Image (tube, grey):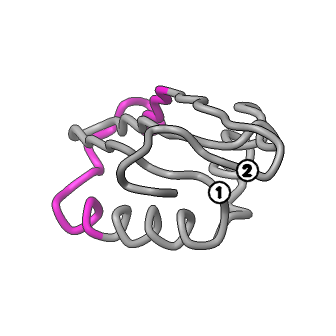
Amino acid sequence: MSQNSKYIHKSHNVTVLLYHLLSSANYRRVVLTDSVDKVLVEVYKAISDRYEIHFLETGTDKNHVHFFIQSVPSYSVTKIVIRFVIKKFV
């Protein structure tokens, strides 16, 4: 994806699909520390390199993570979330 454009350009279409997702820890436990945050950043990079999913912004709190994601139409929101939950991305 070009850094100058907010759109994803393909041979026959141009898309801008943005999703804001939230993932919380079980029972809202405090588990997201700075070291976990660093590991998550590495995972985001691996996912972006392998799939057409771009993490525009991410944010962590002690018990939840926010994702602001841009993707192509071939990946539905459900498909993205299921792959996160059952860890098929990496």
* Residue sitting nearer the eye, 20 or 4: 4
Give the label on residue 86, or none: none
Q: Secondary structure at mark 1?
A: loop
Residue kind at label 2, given as amino acid type = Lys
Bounds of the magenta span?
20-38
* Residue sitting nearer the eye, 30 or 64: 64
CA–CA distance in space, label 2 to label 1: 11 Å
Q: Position of residue 36 (x, y in %)?
A: 29, 63
Q: Secondary structure at mark 2?
A: loop
Q: Position of residue 13 (x, y in %)?
A: 77, 38
The quarter of the picture where residue 51 lies is bottom right
* Residue sitting nearer the eye, 29 or 61: 61
- Return the residue at label 2: 10
- Residue at the location (32% across, 42% down)? 57
* Residue sitting nearer the eye, 69 or 63: 69
The quarter of the picture where residue 45 lies is bottom left
- Return the residue at label 1: 52
- Residue at the location (67% across, 39% down)? 81
26 falls in the magenta region: yes
Q: Quadrant of the C terminus?
A: bottom right
Residue kind at label 1, given as amino acid type = Glu
- Residue at the location (63% across, 50% down)? 84
